Amino acid sequence: MGLIHLYCGDGKGKTTAAFGLALRAQGADFRVVIAQFLKTEPTGEVTALRNLPRVTLLRAERRFGFTWTLSPEEQQALRREQNALFSRAIAACPQEGPVLLVLDEVVGTDRYGYLDPAPLRTFLRAVPENVEVVLTGRDPAPDILELADYVTEMKKIRHPFDRGIPARDGIEQ
């Protein structure tokens, strides 16, 4: 039975939890499809996952920078790319055998209008039985919360970034 996991909140660890589940699923002979929305920077986990069999990693092809700095034309281009990435992720899921589909940062992409809402919701309302879905990101829409079978909120209590310490290789990226 395909269930939906939602890792949300303002704390560190949403992507890490999703990728940990991807590692577990891959070790149990699942096909794993990961789509990373709004992320283009190289990270340690991306490097590691690309070396694993049965893992398909899809990312945006163009780097846009911070969404709040984009012109209206750049925002339209970003929307087109994010919608194409979602379509590629769904198409990459095999029809048979167990599949883990990770839609990393899809929640914010949806919430802030960079993904057409209908295809995501249509998919989530009829997840194929062989597909387990993981959604990550901040501020999920109420209907996304309702569709999820698992909801885990990461809450920030303290983070070094608040003291001006940037993301560090191998720890935050």
Image (tube, rainbow, N blue to C red):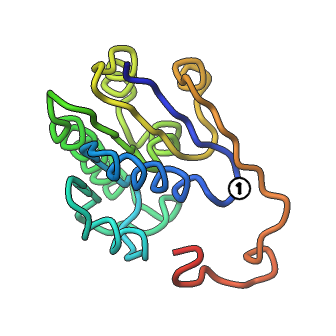
Residue occupying image coordinates x 30% and y 25%: 119
- Which residue appears at 73% of the width and 76% of the height? 161
Image quadrant in which you'd find residue 63: bottom left
Q: In this image, 130 relative to 10: left or right?
A: left
Image check: 168 left or right of 56? Answer: right
**Viewer-proximal residue, 70 or 13?**
13
Looking at the rendered structure, the kind of residue marked 1 is Gly
Residue 56, placed above or below residue 160: above
Q: Give residue 127's position: percent from left, percent from top.
A: 33, 21
Q: Residue at x 65, y 83 (%)?
A: 166
The residue pinned by badge 1 equals 11
Q: Position of residue 69 (x, y in %)?
A: 49, 65
- Helix or strand or loop: what does disc 1 sit on? loop
Q: Is residue 165 above or below residue 146?
A: below
If the image is split into quadrants, where does the N terminus sit? top left
Residue at the image point whose x is 15% and y is 35% from the top: 94
Q: Give coordinates of residue 123: x percent, y percent.
A: 32, 22
Residue at the extreme right of the image, as rendered: 157
Could you tell whether 5 is left or right of 115 in the image?
A: right
- Indicate the quadrant where residue 2 lies: top left
In this view, 122 is above or below 109 = above
Q: Residue 158, located in which quarter of the rendered image?
A: bottom right
- Return the residue nearer the eye: 26 or 35: 26
Residue lying at the far top in this picture: please name it.
126
In this rendering, the answer to whether 36 lies above or below 64 is above
